[in-house]
Image (cartoon, helix red, strand yellow):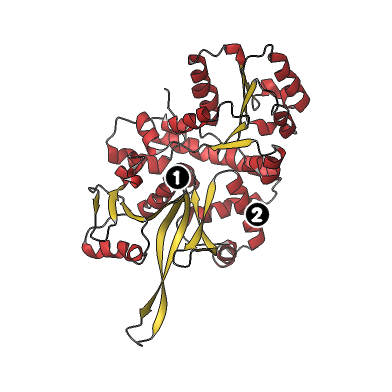
Amino acid sequence: MVINRDLYLDKLLSRRHNGMIKVITGMRRCGKSYLLFNLFSEYLLNKRVAPDHIIKIDLEDRRNKELRDPDALLNHLDSLRKDSDMYYILLDEVQMVDEFEDVLNSFLKVTNADVYVTGSNAKFLATDIITEFRGRGDEIRVRPLSFREYMTVESVKDREQRLIDYMTYGGLPQVALMDDDIQKEDYLKSLFLRTYLRDIKERYLLKNDGDLEELINVLASNIGGLTNPARLENTFRSVKHRELTSDTIKTYIDLLEDAFMLEKAMRYDIKGRKHIDSPYKYYFSDLGLRNARLNFRQTEFTHLLENLIYNELRRRGLSVDVGQVVTTVTDPNTGKRKRSYLEVDFVCNRGYRRYYIQSALAMPNNEKLEQELSSLKKINDGFKKFVIVGNVTPTYQTNDGITIMSIYDFLTDENILEQ
């Protein structure tokens, strides 16, 4: 079955022949290879590009082991270009090649070579490597299937059940194509242990990997909660009865972010217009992997909903912070004035646009509605404000100009924030 990834395919097409190395990044099994070797390659063939001018090499395939040598790969690619017509060079998992930066830089001045590569580790695009590309590396980040993309695969069940399945098993394409829930659970658990964790352990030569696994469990149990390495150190000492320093915890979190498994959202003082250094919130890039790590025991809809909204906002290209509104209130007991801190789940920016978004499981009465609106009402600028509700509700606007919408409308309408 073909799963269209139009958002990413369009990004590839808009970068054709731009003189840069197109670098497709993202977590393993999110569909990078399929995008490049199937969807993009099929597009080129439909545009009458000759098959021998589309050079595809999977460097993770052991059959291509000899091409992991940088000189062998460069000589092989040169031997396949036999005329002055444009050649499309598609390299999958290029980080398997030693000194791959030199190989890619060798094509920057080749006028009839358009180069596209994939990589699964964010270190692959660290600042020093971007420098090696001399400012000519163009990153395209691929994420697991969005709910809209998932809906094209799973079309038998009703919308509500499909959302529950999506929030339970996530958006990895291979999982979406499976019919049996037990098969999905077994696959996700195995994938976590034998692919993601194994990659991290082998890449960074970790010896005490039990601490890393325990840290993942703690983070998975605390999605949507404010934390930092110092707090996590205290958790390990008081709850887990284990010593794990904040420096080690920070290193492990960095590794998880480098593998695209986690993302960190910083706090932002809305009135003060500045970022707050700590604590942060961490969200999992795929909910299925998060749930698999906890054996599908902790599937609280409230926390999963917040993580889901975060992922969708990031997929749409928005930068996302956790908002804080500082206000002054009068203590009814003492009559003294004191500071009060209200949270806005997400402060989203793209260019000159900004959106304030609250996530709410449900709003069954006016009291709950006012609770969700309270922090948004304290923001006095003119940017749009939204509350996304986890059940079916018509989209409407309050007297304060705040838009209420259901999670289904948000996930299925790409432009709803602009309306």
Tell me which residue sits at (55%, 30%) in the image: 15
Query: Quarter holding the N terminus?
Result: top left
Residue 30: x and y in percent read 51, 35
- Name the outermost residue toward the right: 71
Q: Answer few, some or many: residues within 10 Å of disc 1's Cα (few below 14, many 20 plus, some between 14 and 19).
A: many
Amino acid under disc 2: Thr
- Spatial CA distance of label 2 from label 1 is 23 Å
Q: Is residue 72 left or right of residue 289?
A: right
Q: Say which residue label 1 marks.
A: 287
Residue 209: x and y in percent read 64, 49
Q: Is residue 177 visible?
A: yes
Q: Answer few, some or many: residues within 10 Å of disc 2's Cα (few below 14, many 20 plus, some between 14 and 19).
A: some
Tell me which residue sits at (62%, 62%) in the image: 242
Tell me which residue sits at (36%, 51%) in the image: 301
Q: Helix or strand or loop: what does disc 1 sit on?
A: helix
Amino acid under disc 1: Leu
Residue 126: x and y in percent read 66, 44
Say which of 193 and 260 sits in front.
Answer: 260
Q: Is residue 244 visible?
A: no
Residue 357: x and y in percent read 37, 55
Q: Is residue 181 left or right of residue 233?
A: left
Q: Quadrant of residue 326?
A: bottom left
**Above or below for 255 versus 278:** above
First of labels 2, 1 by sequence position: 2
Per the rendering, the mark at residue 415 is none
Q: Say which residue label 2 marks.
A: 251
**Above or below for 24 versus 399:** above
**Above or below for 331 versus 109:** below
